[in-house]
Image (tube, rainbow, N blue to C red):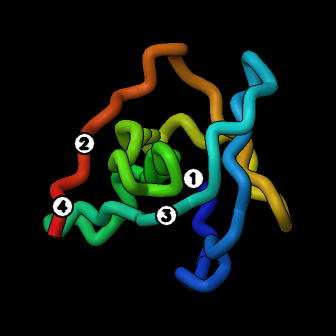
Amino acid sequence: MIFLLYNIENFKNKQIVSVETGAVLGYISELEIDTETGAVANIVVFGKPKLLGVLGREEDIEIPWKNIEVIGNETVLVKGPVNIKRSKRKSL
């Protein structure tokens, strides 16, 4: 098992790209941490705003950490099923 240390700042502004389709899924918005193990469970890409945010946003995309293939300087390559788990963020 390989252990790498990353700072949260290292993930800021990294683009998420699907290895299977070549589609750009967006940019990392949040990291979800498993409080029992302290490990990153998912990366979250916020949904795109609809009509400049006036009509809300599309659903967020959650990508399990285990689906990450490569973390590069500017991109993160992910592999996994096409139906990536989606969840809707609550408004404040």
Q: Real-space Cα distance between discs 2 and 1?
A: 34 Å
Q: Is residue 18 above or below residue 52?
A: above
* Residue 92 percent across, percent down from the top left: 15, 70
Mark number for residue 1?
Answer: 1
Q: Which residue is mark 4?
A: 91
Q: What is the three-letter code of the residue carrying label 1?
A: Met
The nearer-to-camera label among 2 and 1 is 2
- Mark 2 or 1, nearer chain start: 1
- Mark 4 or 3, nearer chain start: 3
The residue nearer to you, when weighing 16 against 49, is 49
- Mark 3 or 2, nearer chain start: 3
The residue nearer to you, when weighing 14 against 90, is 90
Secondary structure under the numbered disc 3 in the rendered image: loop
Q: What is the three-letter code of the residue carrying label 3?
A: Ser
Q: Can the viewer see residue 43? A: no
- Mark 1 or 4, nearer chain start: 1
Residue visible at 60% across and 78% down in the picture: 5
Residue visible at 53% across and 81% down in the picture: 8
Q: Which residue is mark 3?
A: 29
Q: What is the three-letter code of the residue carrying label 2?
A: Lys
For residue 22, side relative to residue 65 (left or right): right
Q: Real-space Cα distance between discs 3 and 2?
A: 14 Å
For residue 71, side relative to residue 55 (left or right): right
Q: Which residue is mark 2?
A: 88
The nearer-to-camera label among 1 and 4 is 4
Q: Real-space Cα distance between discs 1 and 4?
A: 39 Å
